[in-house]
């Protein structure tokens, strides 16, 4: 009996490597791309995001091309595989929040709360797609290994979280723990669940932020036990 073809998987090491490849390619870009290049790449990434949301098990280069309104050959000029395209999409979602965090003029807890609000606002758009992508390795292990995706996440939250630590007089030595707690509590799956349960985006952001402050202070208070 012939072996059945395995369904396309969007988890695991191959996808992570694809996202890292997208990170490196974007960071090496030294000149502005042509307009048609930007347009076509945008169409491809939009198609990938839509497919990850509606039919994650069916992502393939021909279907990406069909949804993007491009030829398969054109899609292959931008990405070598579906995994590469998904990795680029994941990184594009990180990049949008990173730009917001870097450009925000606020400081202290106000900065953290503004970036949280933007994070929650973006989740209904990107969350259903990005929750399909998970790593088997724990967050702190990836942070310690200087995983490039986690480094990008750290780049978003470094200034906001350090402002929170200063506000609550929590030693900077707890930064990695604070980032770990953020990653655990602001998971897009849980944010989507809260919004779908009937909470507004504003209420979701407020409740998660208050819970985060409590968890962070509780973590730091354990030093005194």
Image (cartoon, helix red, strand yellow):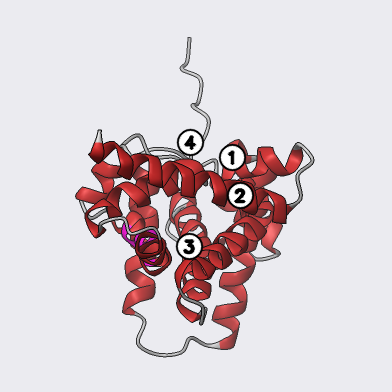
For the residue pair 49 and 122, the one nearer the viewer reads as: 122
SS class, disc 2? helix
Q: Is 174 located above or below residue 154 in the figure? A: above
The secondary structure type at the circle numbered 1 is: helix
Which span of residues is magenta-colored? 151-155
Residue at mark 3 to residue at mark 4: CA–CA distance? 21 Å
Residue 189 lies within the magenta run: no
Q: Which residue is mark 4?
A: 9
Q: Quadrant of the rendered structure where residue 199 is? A: top right
Q: CA distance from mark 4 to mark 1?
A: 19 Å
Look at the numbered discs 3 and 2 and tell me whether their residues touch, using CB distance below 8 Å. Answer: no
Any magenta on residue 154? yes
Alpha-carbon distance for marks 4 and 2?
Answer: 18 Å
> Mark 4 near mark 2, Cβ–Cβ under 8 Å?
no
In the rendered image, which quarter contains the C terminus? top left
Q: Is residue 111 left or right of residue 63?
A: left
Mark 4 or mark 2, earlier in chain: 4
Which of the marked residues, 2 or 1, is nearer the chain's N terminus? 2
The numbered dot on residue 138 is: none
Give the residue furthest to the top: 1
Tag in front: 4 or 1: 1
Q: Which residue is mark 2?
A: 127
Q: Which residue reaches farthest right?
A: 198
Q: Is residue 137 above or below residue 41?
A: above
Residue located 50% across and 26% down the image: 5
Q: Gap in Å between the C-alphas at discs 3 and 2?
A: 11 Å
């Amino acid at each position: 009996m012939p072996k059945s073809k395995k369904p396309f998987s969007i988890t695991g090491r191959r996808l992570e490597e694809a996202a890292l490849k997208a990170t490196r390619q974007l960071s090496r870009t030294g000149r502005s791309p042509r307009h048609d290049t930007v347009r076509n790449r945008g169409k491809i990434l939009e198609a990938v995001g839509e497919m990850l949301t509606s039919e994650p098990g069916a992502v393939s280069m021909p279907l990406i091309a069909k949804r993007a309104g491009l030829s398969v050959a054109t899609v292959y000029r931008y990405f070598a595989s579906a995994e590469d395209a998904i990795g680029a999409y994941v990184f594009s979602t990180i990049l949008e929040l990173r730009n917001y965090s870097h450009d925000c003029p606020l400081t202290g807890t106000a900065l953290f709360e503004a970036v949280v609000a933007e994070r929650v606002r973006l989740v209904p758009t990107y969350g259903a797609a990005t929750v399909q992508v998970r790593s088997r390795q724990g967050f702190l292990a990836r942070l310690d290994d200087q995983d490039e995706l986690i480094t990008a996440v750290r780049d978003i939250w470094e200034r906001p979280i350090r402002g929170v630590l200063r506000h609550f007089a929590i030693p900077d030595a707890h930064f990695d723990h604070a980032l770990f707690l953020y990653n655990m509590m602001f998971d897009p799956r849980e944010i989507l669940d809260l919004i779908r349960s009937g909470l507004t985006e504003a209420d979701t952001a407020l409740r998660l932020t208050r819970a985060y402050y409590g968890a962070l202070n509780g973590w730091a208070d354990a030093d005194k036990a």
